[in-house]
Image (spheres, rainbow, N blue to C red):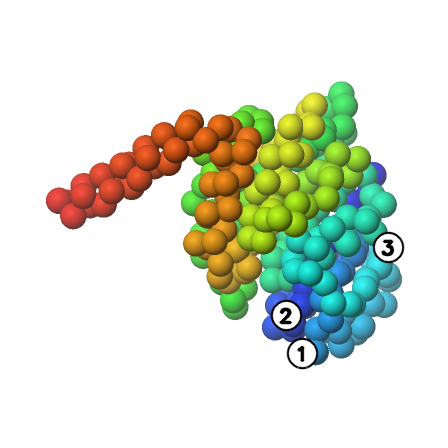
Amino acid sequence: MTFSIITVTCNAAQWIERTIQSIISQSYSGIEYIIVDGGSTDGTLDIITDYKLRITDKGCRFRWISEPDGGIYDAMNKGLKLATGDYVWFINAGDSIHSPDTIREIVNQLSTVNRQPSIIYGETEISDTRGNSSGMRRLKAPEKLTWKSFKMGMLVSHQSFIVKREIAGAYDLQYRYAADFEWCIRCLKKADHILNTHLILSYFLEAGFSAANRKASLKERYEAMCRYYGKIPTQIRHLWFAVRFYFAKWIKRKI
């Protein structure tokens, strides 16, 4: 079984090495590693070139390209087109796989199930720009995940969401900041079996793309929710979110 791990990067020389190291340190060898670079000029390409032999020496199939793109999701689509593995997994520059045995532990779980899951998911730990842990992601992955789960928000981080390649369609480029959210919903709608590993699968760099564009990302997520879950139910749900948020703040002030 092969995992196509895709790293999208552009001018991320301070972070890309951490990501590459987390891939090549894996104790499982069935990895196809794909790096899609957006034409970096800051030394990122030098780092990728330096690691090329070390990646292949680890037994990974390695492919990489460097060229201008239309943004992060356009680059992700390029990665999907290059992927040939059974599963695709996006670990972008600055993010990393949680431990050297993470993929082996996933494969061990797969050996105990009757059929290969369409989607594999788990928990996410947050890391700062120095690579230190900032604790677990605030939203915990649900015990059972379906396409309707995301009406409550992105309950599973994109970095801990592994999809069978045959159901992984292209990212919708009409979304500039939340195409990953919409993509996850589409993949979940196609899935016939979903596996909760109960493992921490990844570290997410809190200074990443979505964090820097949080307001625009939340707006697009709202639009995607209206599209898939209905406008009126989504509006009611967000009104409840707002009431709960301000009530919690009021209680905190009283304490």
Looking at the picture, does residue 127 appear above or below residue 117?
below
The image position of residue 94, as x and y in percent, is 60, 62
Residue sitting farthest toward the top:
114
The image position of residue 108, as x and y in percent, is 73, 35
Foreground pick, 203 / 191: 191
Give the quadrant of the N terminus: top right
Residue type at mark 3: give it: Arg
Judge whether residue 17 can be spotted in this image: yes
User: Would residue 181 be found to the left or right of residue 9 on screen?
Assistant: left
Determine the image quadrant of residue 67.
Answer: bottom right
Q: Are marks 1 and 2 in contact (CB under 8 Å)?
A: yes
Determine the image quadrant of residue 9.
Answer: bottom right
Return the mark for residue 12.
2
Q: Are marks 2 and 3 in contact (CB under 8 Å)?
A: no
Looking at the picture, does residue 141 appear above or below residue 44?
above
Of the two numbered discs 3 and 1 on the same chain, state the one appearing first in sequence: 1
Which residue bears the numbered disc 1?
Answer: 42
